Image (cartoon, grey):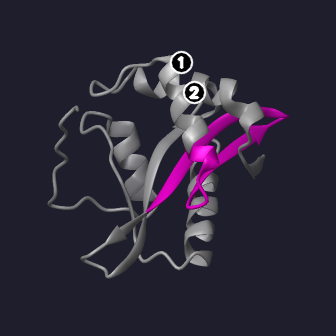
Amino acid sequence: MKIRTATEDDIPVMAELLHELFAIEVDFSPDFAVQTKGLLLLLERSDAEIFLAEFDGHVVGMCSIQTHISTAKGCEVGVVEDVVVDLNYRGRGIGAALLRRLEEWSVKRGLARLQLLADRDNNPALGFYRRQGWHSTNLISWMKHL
C-alpha cells in the first residue's frame, strides 16, 4: 500500500469514492459534477490536501484536510473530510494509514487540532475513529443551505 497526494488526474476515481461515501450519508447526495468541482477547488488551495491510498496500483481510499482558524485555540486547526475506503478493501489498515499521513501533514503545518464530522448512524465509522484515538465532543453540527 502507498499513500500519496492527489492530483487532478485522480479526480474521476476520487469522485467514485465520494459517490460511495455520500450514498450512505443522509445529509449529502452523490453528484459527480458537484464532487468534481469541489475536488478541483481543494486541489487549487495551498492550505488543503487530499491524500490517496493505492493498493496494487489502484486508488482504493482517500481523505482530505483543510485548515481553519480556531478562535478557541488561537491558531490554525484542520478540518478533515472525505475519509473513505472502497468497501472491498476495508479492514486492511488503509483508513488508519490515511489518517496517519494526514496527521503527519498537520503536525508539519503546526495545526493544533483536527476535527471531523461523522454520520451518527455510521457505527463502523464511529468505531474506526475511536480506535484511531479520536473522541466525540459535546458539539452537534448544524447546517443551513444557501
| Segment tinted magenta in the rendering | 42-67
Q: Position of residue 38 (x, y in %)?
A: 51, 35
Q: Badge 1 is on which residue? A: 32
Q: On the image, which quarter does residue 105 sit in?
A: bottom right
**Could you tell me how far apart the alpha carbons at marks 1 and 2 are, in whole angstroms?**
6 Å
Magenta-span inclusion, residue 46:
yes
Secondary structure beneath dot 1 equals helix
CB within 8 Å, label 1 to label 2: yes
Disc marking residue 81: none
- Left or right: where 94 falls relative to 134: right
Front residue of this view, candidates 29 and 87: 29
Q: Position of residue 78 (x, y in %)?
A: 44, 63
Instruction: Report the residue at 32% width, 35% height from top.
Output: 122
- Left or right: where 106 falls relative to 75: right
Magenta-span inclusion, residue 62:
yes
Q: Position of residue 100 (x, y in %)?
A: 60, 62
Instruction: Report the residue at 26% width, 58% height from top.
Output: 136
Q: Amino acid at mark 1?
A: Phe
Q: Is residue 99 above or below residue 91?
A: below
Front residue of this view, candidates 3 and 12: 12
Q: Position of residue 83 (x, y in %)?
A: 50, 43
Front residue of this view, candidates 5 and 36: 36
Q: Badge 2 is on which residue? A: 36
Secondary structure beneath dot 2 equals helix
Q: Amino acid at mark 2?
A: Thr
Instruction: Report the residue at 45% width, 53% height from top.
Output: 80
Front residue of this view, candidates 41 and 79: 41
Q: On the image, which quarter does residue 77 sit in?
A: bottom left
